[in-house]
Image (tube, helix red, strand yellow):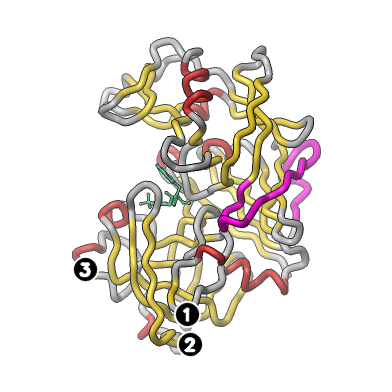
Amino acid sequence: STGSVVTTPQQYDVEYLTPVTIGTPGQNLEIDIDTGSSDFWVFSSETPKSQVNGQTCYNPKKSSTAKKLDGATWEIEYGDGSSSSGDVYLDKVKMGGLNFSSQAIEAATRVSDEFTEDTNNDGLMGLAFGLINQVRPQKQKTFFENLQPSLDKPLFTADLKSGAPGHFNFGYIDKNAYTGSITYTPVNSTQGFWMWTSPGYTIGASGKFKSSPIQGIADTGTTLLLLPSSVVTAYYKKVSGAGYDSSNSGYVFPCDATLPSFYVSVGDSARIKIPGQYMSYAPVDSQGQNCFGGMQSDDGIGFSIFGDVFLKAAFVVFDAGKERLGLAAK
Ligand SMILES: C[C@H](Cc1ccc(C(C)(C)C)cc1)[C@H](NN)c1nnnn1Cc1ccc2c(c1)OCO2
C-alpha cells in the first residue's frame, strides 16, 4: 500500500497541520506530525474543559471501535517545556488513504498551556522510533511502524513548503517532488530519533565550506533550526544589526536586514541550500521592526535540531528499512 496526505503551514510556518480520522464513525482532527517524538496523543473528551480552547476532541465513547487499553497511561515533557498526559485507547486511524485498525490513541487528560493556546492543533502524531514512546506499562508503536509491513517500501517522505501546503507520503518516493538526486546518509536511531550527522556548512553563496560535524535530528515538530552556538554566532556576524536579545532568548535582527543563505552539507558532496528568507522566522514586535532568527542555538539539548526551517528547503526521505535519511533539493 501507499498513502499521501496534505500538510498545511500555520502562520510563520510555526507548525504544519495534517488531517487524520479516528474511530467509527470517523472523527476528523488536525494534528502536528512530529518526526522528533513517538507518541500519538490527541485532545479528548477527557481533557478538562478549562484546558480546551477551540480544539477538536476525540471522544472514544462515540466510537464503536474504540477499546480502552486497560491500565495504560502516558505522560510526555517536550524540550520546549510543554507537556501532556493521559490514558490510552485502541481505535481505527485513517490518514492519507491508509488505515490501521488498532492504533494506540493517547487521549489527553491534561495538557500544558502551550497546547491549550495552540487552538488549531488537536494533537501530535510522533513518527520517530517507538523506542521512545511514553506509554506505560507497555510502549506502543507509531502509526508508521504499524503500517510499515504493509507499505510498498518501508519509508515515508516529508515535503514541507514555505507558506504553502506540502505532503507527507507513505510507502513510495514521488519522483516529481524533488530535483536532482537524493543523497542518503546513515541514521543512528539508538536514542529513538532520526539522528544524522552533517559534515559541515557554508554561510552565503560565496562563503567557504566549514568542515565541522553537526549531529542532529530531523524533526518536523520543531519550528526552527537549532545548531551549535559557534555556527549561530558565525552566521549572525554576517547580518548587520543582528544581536542576542535576552528578552526574547535568541538572535534578533532588523526585519529589513539582508540574510545570507545557509548551506547544510549532506554526505561527501551534496548540500541543502536554505534561502536567506527562510532564516527570518517572525517579527518580535507589533511594528514588525525586529525579527526573530530562524536559526538559534541548540545549547542544553545535547544535539542539534534540523527543524522546519531546514526541512522545508528539502525533500526528505525517512527510510526505516535501511536506517537512513535521504535529502534532495526541490
Ligand atoms: C518541541 C517539539 C514538540 C512540540 C511541538 C509543538 C508544541 C506546541 C503545539 C505547544 C507548539 C509543543 C511541543 C519537538 N518535537 N520533536 C520536541 N519535543 N521534545 N524536544 N523537542 C525538540 C526541542 C527541544 C528543545 C527545544 C526545542 C525543541 O525548542 C526550544 O528548545
**Residue 250 occupies which quadrant of the picture?**
top left
Label 3 to label 2: alpha-carbon separation: 25 Å
Quadrant where the C terminus sits is: top right
Residue at 54 percent across and 81 percent down: it is 102
Name which residue lies at 60% across and 65% down: 96
Kindly check if marks 1 and 2 are in contact, taking CB atoms under 8 A apart as contact. yes
| Closer-to-camera residue (300/248) | 300
Task: Please report the residue visible at 29 percent of the width from the left and 75 percent of the height from the top.
Answer: 46
Residue 103: percent from left, percent from top? 53, 77
Instruction: Single out the residue that lies furthest toward the top.
Output: 240
- Mark seen at residue 49: 3
Give the residue type that dot 2 points to: Thr
As drawn, 74 above or below 5: below
180 sits left or right of 46 in the view: right
Q: Is residue 89 magenta?
A: no
Q: How dense is the environment of label 3, judged by Cα within 10 Å: few (below 14), some, or many (20 and up)?
A: few
- Magenta segment boundaries in residue numbering: 173-195
- Is 190 included in the stretch rendered in magenta? yes
Where is mark 2, residue-wise?
65
For residue 75, above or below residue 201: below
Query: Where is mark 1, residue-wise?
Result: 23
Label 1 to label 2, Cα distance in Å?
Answer: 6 Å
